[in-house]
Amino acid sequence: MRTQVAIIGAGPAGLLLSHLLAVGGVDSVVIETRTREYVESRIRAGILEHSTVELLESVGLGARLRREGDEHRGIYLQWPAERHHIDFHELVGRGVWVYGQTEVQKDLGQARDAAGQQVVYDVRDTTVHDPAEPYVTFTADGVATRLDADVVVGCDGSFGPTRSAVPGQTWQRTYGYSWLGVLAAVAPSTDELIYAWHPDGFALNSMRSPTVTRLYLQVPAETDIAEWSDERIWDALATRLGHGQDGWKLTRGPIMEKSVLPMRSFVQAPMRHGRVFLAGDAAHIVPPTGAKGLNLAVADVALLAPALVALLREKDPRLADEYSDRALRRVWRCTHFSWWMTTMLHASDDPFDAQLQLSQLRWVASSTAGATGLAENYAGLPIGF
Ligand SMILES: Cc1cc2nc3c(=O)[nH]c(=O)nc-3n(C[C@H](O)[C@H](O)[C@H](O)COP(=O)(O)OP(=O)(O)OC[C@H]3O[C@@H](n4cnc5c(N)ncnc54)[C@H](O)[C@@H]3O)c2cc1C
């Protein structure tokens, strides 16, 4: 097989990149280890930044999002006995959209189908060869296949093989806790997300649709999900989110899915080696507190697609040469914001830290300067920031 751009991974970064390349007149083939059904039902992120929505709309991927997604003006910040609304629209003139990653993935899949895009699912043994004249080998339906390309892009997430084909420096931070994420078949108890600091641990009340609630609890790293019955989860959520506080009630419902998400920060640089590029989680991971992972993946490919179009169609390497540095500027900004939100909101055993966190939360909730910093980062900086 031969194509201009071989894309490894059919997550949001990979499928969106193939879409943007097609808009620019560049061919690609996408390969993916999982089945399409698995990829489209994977419960992950659900908050889209303003610039992510604008980009999706600009390439014909915004119709269902506008119809079924929910625009939020801001978030609530909470600690025991207090809840404050941070109004992003008022502070920075833009908000965020609640629209599940599963839905983004389905929209991308349908758009790629309509364009006749080749996406090979269920492959095995993906290997990237020769960064100067790259090709990818893999097995599909038991047949060993070689895919030659002008460029290979690793959109293969944090455990994919492309990262190791791109030598460079790495930075990482682990946190001593994880999130227990729950998807419940019940209408959200809140109009906008509630980020709650509590001495028992952080809790987040999010949502995916008018009938589906997404909730998270801070739990110790390495937590065994079997230790958390549905009842224990709801009790902890009720305590940490302040059920009964000022008349607010957390409505319980059937839990459809629960899983433990490790929290870590990771950045690899550069995001390019020869003609092999990295985008999305393949190059960087953020803890989900700032809702940045999916948005960063989108921002990377929004920079990479025009760079590859210029490189392959006009033989102009300038944008491709700048890609890694430009993408990493935004990656580090979001890495800092995600770390900041995480360390401000998660309980530790240190009582001094707890006082600092509460002081920080009070400042953010009461000072326009503090709230604006949060709003600007959460609603999202421009893609080329
Ligand atoms: C388990 C998990 C839960 C998350 N939950 C949240 C959340 O609750 N809130 C939030 O804001 N963010 C969350 N995130 C972050 C967000 O979902 C990611 O940042 C986003 O999916 C990044 O998109 P991506 O396309 O770069 O990577 P991915 O979505 O990971 O896509 C990478 C794709 O590459 C494929 N792949 C891997 N190896 C190979 C191979 N060898 N050959 C071919 N294909 C391969 C994978 O199967 C996958 O489909 C979560 C991430 C993970 C991993």
Image (tube, grey):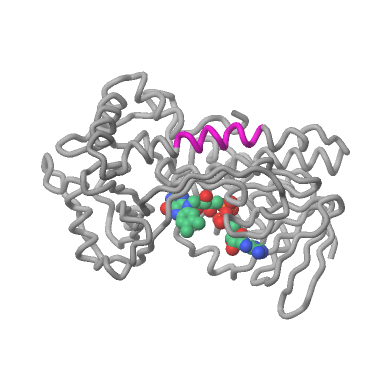
Residue nearest the observer in this picture, 132 or 214? 132
The residue located at (77%, 42%) in the rendering is 308
Q: Quadrant of ligand 1?
A: bottom right
The residue located at (35%, 34%) in the rendering is 74
Answer with left or right where residue 12 lies relative to residue 165. Answer: left
The residue located at (34%, 62%) in the rendering is 223
Residue nearest the observer in this picture, 356 or 87? 356
For the image, the number of numbered tags is 0
Q: Is residue 353 within the magenta segment?
A: no
Q: Is residue 330 within the magenta segment?
A: yes
User: Which quadrant of the figure has residue 375?
Assistant: top left
> In the rendered view, would you say 23 is above or below 260?
above
Name the residue at the bottom extreme: 142
Residue 88: x and y, percent? 38, 29
Residue 319: x and y, percent? 76, 34
Residue 317: x and y, percent? 83, 36
User: Which quadrant of the figure has residue 354?
Assistant: top left
The residue located at (62%, 39%) in the rendering is 58
Residue 271: x and y, percent? 68, 43
**In what quadrant of the picture does the N terminus appear?**
bottom right
**In what quadrant of the picture does the C terminus appear?**
top right
* Magenta span: 326-337
Can the viewer see residue 99? Answer: no
Residue nearest the observer in this picture, 244 or 274? 274
Answer with left or right where residue 35 lies relative to residue 353. Answer: right
Label the magenta part by its dominant secondary structure. Answer: helix
Can the viewer see residue 285? Answer: yes
